[in-house]
Image: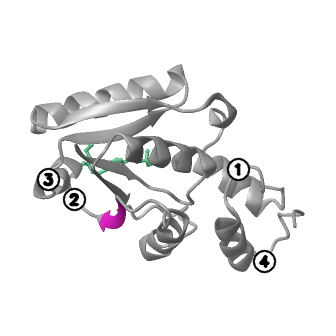
Amino acid sequence: MIAVYPGSFDPPTFGHIDIIERAAKISTRLIVAVAHNYSKNAMFTPDERVAMLTEICAHMPNVEITTFSGLLVEYAGELQANAIIRGLRAVSDFEYEFQMAQANRMLNDKIETLFISTSTKFSYLSSSLVKEIAELGGNVGEMTPKIVLNKILQKSNVLCYNGG
Ligand code: PNS
């Protein structure tokens, strides 16, 4: 199975990594696709997100990191992907994810959306939460890898990690 795992990944969290590791086990090729979304609240550029994810996923030979813009299904079609992977944390994710899966299926019914349920220990985690806590000087060491922590520190100049 060729699968695409799309997202903003601003920044990548342990929740994303959990999904990537599990999706990589059931895919021959997994493309982690960073969306070019021009949100005003973005902490990292798409290239910075790709660089962090490339480092984080270096131990998984069937995982590639890319960026995409435009429609996800078009990009997935170009890659000849069979599936789009999304993580589901809680019921609150469901409505948005279900709508997106339905819309994507209407646009291209050859690509299935597969949901992987997030590990319980990461079910509270989101990139926006990490950004908010880090920007307010909180400790996000349990939420995101050290590579990301260092980048956050460089960006915000805030001491948000007390770990070694
Ligand atoms: O991590 P996110 O922000 O929840 O990811 C959302 C993302 C990037 C997967 C979604 O917004 C997306 O697919 N954007 C690309 C544009 C597109 O295809 N939109 C129609 C989706 S129904």
Closer to the camera: disc 3 or disc 2? 3
Residue 16, image x and y in percent?
A: 52, 48
User: How far apart are labels 4 and 3 at the CA level?
Assistant: 39 Å
Q: Secondary structure at mark 1?
A: loop
Q: What span is colored magenta in the figure?
A: 63-67
Is 45 situated above or below 99? Answer: below
Residue located 53% across and 64% down the image: 42
Q: Circle 3 is placed at which residue position?
A: 74
Q: Circle 4 is placed at which residue position?
A: 157
How packed mark 4 is, by other alpha carbons closer than 10 Å (few <14, some 14-19, many 20 or more), is few
User: How far apart are labels 1 and 4 at the CA level?
Assistant: 18 Å
The circle drawn on residue 70 is 2
Whether residue 65 is in magenta: the answer is: yes
- Callout 4: CB less than 8 Å from ligand 1: no
Q: How is the image coloured?
A: one colour
User: How far apart are labels 3 and 2 at the CA level?
Assistant: 8 Å
